[in-house]
């Protein structure tokens, strides 16, 4: 029957008794399956990570300026990676860096939640924040 119609005989479920087969154009079936997968892939949410860099001696005005950007990033739905970069001997101010990041976390409490608390990695102290879901 499939040859008469110029189509393919495709086995749908081989374990059934008797096995289930379907007459269809196999190339068209593969094409539509790829199209569906591509549509699902485009709808999947892409995670964007924005970075904000501080120094251990960051001044109030600079802090406020960067906080404003952080709020914008979180409102747009991007994750935030805030870090304090220690240059040279400034590594002795680890506590100041941690205080700065915790202050940022407290100020951004209504826009996002902390995913990872401040943690020292090499010459950087890193903290991650995720945006809060809007209800």
Image: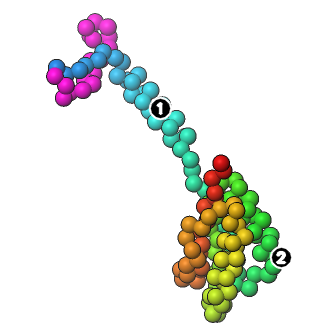
Look at the numbered disc 1 and give the secondary structure of its residue: helix
- The answer to whether residue 118 shows anywhere in this view is yes
- 21 relative to 108, above or below: above
Q: Which residues are magenta?
A: 1-17
Q: Which residue is mark 1?
A: 36
Residue at the top extreme?
4
Q: Earlier in the sequence, mark 1 or mark 2?
A: 1
* Residue 117 location (% of width, % of height): 57, 74
In-image side of 6 versus 31 (left or right)? left
Q: Nearer the viewer, residue 37 or 133?
A: 133
Residue at (83, 76) in percent of width and height: 61
Front: mark 1 or 2: 2
Residue at (72, 70) in percent of width and height: 107
- What colouring method underlies this structural image? rainbow
In-image side of 95 versus 72 (left or right)? left
Q: Residues within 10 Å of mark 1 (few under 14, many from 20)?
A: few
Instruction: Kindly identify which numbered label has been placed on residue 61.
Output: 2
Residue at the front extreme?
135
* Residue 54 location (% of width, % of height): 70, 77
Residue at the left extreme?
17
Q: Residues within 10 Å of mark 2 (few under 14, many from 20)?
A: few
In-image side of 17 versus 81 (left or right)? left
- Answer whether residue 55 is magenta in the image: no
- 74 relative to 42, above or below: below
Look at the numbered disc 2 and give the secondary structure of its residue: helix
């Amino acid at each position: 029957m499939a040859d008469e119609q110029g189509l393919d005989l495709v086995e749908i479920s081989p374990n059934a008794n008797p096995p289930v087969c379907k007459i269809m154009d196999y190339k068209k079936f593969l094409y539509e399956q790829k199209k569906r997968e591509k549509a699902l892939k485009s709808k999947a949410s892409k995670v964007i990570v924005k970075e904000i860099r501080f120094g251990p001696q960051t001044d109030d005005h600079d802090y406020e300026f960067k906080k404003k950007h952080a709020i914008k990033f979180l409102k747009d739905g991007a994750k935030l990676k805030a870090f304090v970069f220690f240059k040279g001997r400034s590594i002795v101010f680890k506590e100041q860096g941690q205080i700065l990041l915790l202050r940022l976390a407290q100020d951004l409490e209504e826009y996002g939640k902390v995913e990872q608390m401040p943690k020292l990695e090499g010459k950087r102290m890193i903290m991650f924040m995720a945006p809060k879901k809007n209800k």
